Amino acid sequence: MSRLGKEEETEILQKIRDGDRSAFEKLYDAYSAAIYGMVTKILRSEEAAEDVTQDTFVKIWKYIHSYDSQKGKLFTWMLNIARNTAIDALRKTGNVGKPKIQTFDSAVHISEGGKTESPVITIGLRDFVNKLSPEYRIIVNYIYFNGYTQKEVAEELDIPLGTVKTRIRKAVQDLRKIFKLLLLWI
């Protein structure tokens, strides 16, 4: 089954709130593949993703009464539960702070001759970022090398969004100083 239409979703949602397990199975059939795919990208493990997907749907069943259609779409609400459950699973395994989207090391491209090459934009930049203090370095890694948003970094590291914004601004200022010093030597 593909995604549900708005009317069908509303009907199934009410049935689930009334405790109808067959309606919940329809919801699972409609969205489990998309949720599993997203969770797999975060966890990079099919086995772990299966467990987290199952945990996600248990939470959806348990907390379906807290969903408010005025605040957003059902699918978005479900994705947020899945994402948070996946992040919790990463924390339990001790993988917090390690990039989940794409690491610099895996951002290698294969040219026509079969040779590997790093993206030109990041050549040497990692060396400068490594000179930053750890609290700045981790945020730069998440945002610039792994494609996270500031909000995602705040959620991932469990720190306030304002702190992320301040640290990234300070990190950019520190990088400017490093680059200015480098230019003086050239």
Image (tube, helix red, strand yellow):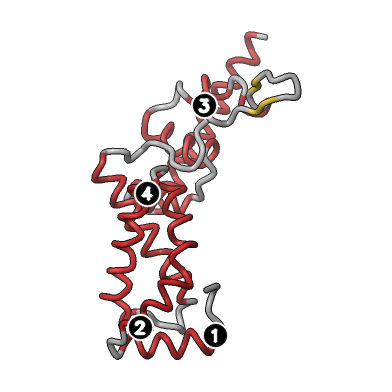
Q: Earlier in the sequence, mark 3 or mark 2?
A: 2
Density class for disc 2 (Cα within 10 Å; few <14, some 14-19, many ≥20) is: few
**Is tag 4's residue or tag 1's residue first in the polypeptide sequence?**
1
Q: Amino acid at mark 1?
A: Lys
Residue type of the residue flagged with mark 2: Ser
Q: Are marks 3 and 4 in contact (CB under 8 Å)?
A: no
Place of residue 83 in the rendered image (x, y in percent of width and height, measured from the top left): 39, 57
Q: Which residue is mark 3?
A: 105
Characterize the local packing of mark 4: few (<14), some (14-19) or many (20 or more) Cα atoms within 10 angstroms: some
Q: Nearer the viewer, residue 164 or 155?
A: 155
Real-space Cα separation, disc 1 to disc 3, in angstroms = 42 Å
Give the vertical position of 55 relative to 167 (above or below). Answer: below
Q: Secondary structure at mark 3?
A: loop
Q: Residue at x 26, y 41 (%)?
A: 93
Q: Which residue is mark 1?
A: 6
Residue shown at the point (49%, 76%) measured from the top left: 73
Between the C-alphas of marks 4 and 1, the distance is 31 Å
Indicate which label's residue lies in the foreground, 4 or 1. 1
Judge by depth and name the residue closer to the eye, 128 or 166. Answer: 128
